[in-house]
Amino acid sequence: MKIRRNTLLGCIVLLAMISLAVVIAAPAQNVPANAREAAALPQFAQRLAHHGTASHRALVRGRARSCSALQGSGLRRTLPLDGVFYANGPSNGLCDIQNCDVDAWTVNFGFSVTDTIGSGGNVNSFNLAFWLLPGDTVQSVDWALGTSAFGSNLGYGTASVSDQFLFTNTYGYDIHQITITGLNVAVSTGDWLTLQNAVVNTGDPAYWDENAGPSQAETNGVGTIPSESFNVSGNGDSCMPERQGSFKVIHDFTGNGDGGSPSGVVIDRAGNLYGPTQPYGGTGTVYKMAQAGSGWVLDNLYTFAGGNNGGTPGGVMVGHSGILYGAASGGIENCTSGGYCGLIFGLRPSPTACVTASCSWTENVLYRFTGSTDAWQGSGLVSDQAGNLYGVSESGGAQQKGAVFELTPSGGVWVESILYSFTGGSDGGTPTDIIVGNDGNLYGMAALWGAYGGGVVFQLTPSGSGWTEAVLYDLPSSPLGTNPHSLLQDSAGNLFGTFDYAGCCASSVGLIFMLSPSNGNWVFNELHHGNANLDGDDLFPNMTLDEAGNLHGTEVAYSGCINTVNYGYIFELARGSNGWQYSTPVAWDNTYFGTGGALALDAHGNLYGTTSDCGAYNHGTVWEFTGTQ
């Protein structure tokens, strides 16, 4: 589960209370008997002696406790690539044949047991061996994952479990396999799994099986004990399918040479994809993906040097002659208490002949922003037919309320001009998007101020030696911010975009709109909005427009601050005789699908995008959607 920003104060308080409740117990003063010791106790000996007469009925899944918090984890389906990546077994409860020197250790009555995990990965589920008194079943158990014994800094929760009877051992205990599923936690070799507070239907003890394995285990009262018996499954896609129908992941970023945390893709006329990644032990990269047979090959075009030459690139665009343009951090140190002001870069193939399959491109810094009243940290580049570049600065400009800038090639260099500086009044401020309209004017969106404080949709028109702004629509006020983005224009001149408004329970709801020119005015139409009744966000991270004027995009939602359920969609908004029709040819429940950055459509209508995390290595993906399910 990804813990989102917009949860109720009550949920925050509840989580805080739960976090106190799942802190691993301090060393117990009275250590409960282990399984072999308990077998000799009067209250258990008679029941264990008559174990052969007990009938074992089919076991059912235990009911979850109310408010079963999962922090640092998430509910999700088992995914196709999931499998056992660490086996800490076998389960030696079968001591009537061998290993009768093993034991099992209490994980209830305030007693905790913790054990190391011998291999890293993305945990989806645990299988555990328990010793139980005849007729008992485990209904739930508290689990925690941490970087130290009894730690919970990686994740914790109270999980309802599936409980399967395996056999009865010579002590008379029933050996059960206990399965905890629905997790999404990344662990490293040497991290610790801790169990406690097991709930048994009769209130009896529950004992975690010991297997005398090589790793280290501890109890909170008797020191080091042999390794416990459990398997760790996962290492598939950490939060979404690699393939489902016509959806598939075409690259899983590893966080190594190919980078990670990609933010959108663009496409050239040949169908090649390009995009940026963020630093993983470096300063970020720009990559190219080209089709090779039935698959795709990724080529790292450029790795940024940082500092004066930039790093941490934002989105890129394909310009004239196949040059890639984009914005990056770095440049001049003259902004925000000595911080870098940012720059605009261009990437092109090396002028020398390339004799290998993978060749680096060269960077040309077009412009380094000079200060906070310049369009510092400018981004969102677009181009007109003459090759001029335009972009926005969210907090630059003369009043430092945002600006729109232009870069024009002249005599081998690029000249910057500030076209408009926002005042933070009725004209809005903090611009987020800019496009070049069919009529040559600029259209954009700003996230703040305006008539209602929620920002504006605006037009910039050249006027004499400058540009004049006109507000086309005032966005409504929202306490969580309107976050306007994905501004598009069709061939008829209609504008499309999305913004957020406040829904139920301190959540944000996305709204997709159309602004249509009509007799010198602009008419606003709502095309679709998310579910405003969710106790959680329902948002549209990105959109694009096909040649027929239909909208395609992604939708991400979640419900509940406790036992959160995630929803991910690829949607289409198609023009029809009865208006706009919304459909979700791909929809996932209980699967996180956090997309970001630009989407791209190829000539065949295939849709491409990225996730900043997820994937086989949890460092992000590039995905492809080729049609309806």
Image (tube, grey):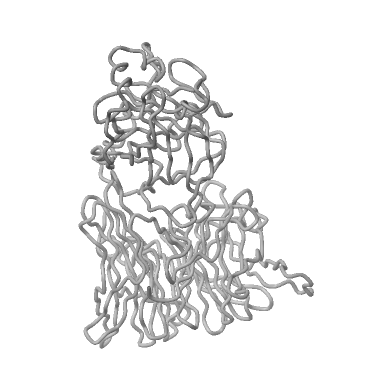
Task: Decide if residue 247 is on the left or right side of residue 357.
Answer: left
Query: In which quarter of the view is residue 492 placed?
Result: bottom left
Residue 484 visible in the current orientation: no
Q: Look at 52% across and 25% down and name the residue there.
A: 99
Q: Can residue 321 be seen at all in this image of the molecule?
A: yes
Q: Quadrant of the C terminus?
A: bottom left
> Does residue 196 appear to the left or right of 236 in the view shown?
left
The one of 107 and 337 positioned closer to us in this rendering: 107
Residue 326 location in percent, x, y? 57, 67
**Residue lying furthest front:** 53
Q: Is residue 290 above or below residue 45?
A: below
Q: In the drawing, does residue 281 fall left or right of residue 463? A: right
Q: Position of residue 186 (x, y in %)?
A: 49, 44
Position of residue 406 relative to residue 260, above or below, is below
Which quadrant would residue 454 be assigned to in this image? bottom left
Give the vertical position of 447 relative to 19 (above or below): below
Give how far across and how far down residue 132 sits, in percent.
Answer: 34, 28
Residue at (79, 72) in percent of width and height: 355
Total marks drawn? 0
313 or 417: nearer the viewer = 313
Residue 627, quarter of the rendered image:
bottom left
Residue 11: x %, y % from top left: 26, 41
Asked if residue 401 is positioned above or below residue 137 in the image, the reply reads: below
- In depth, the one of 617 and 115 nearer the eye is 115
Q: Residue at x 48, y 52 (%)?
A: 82
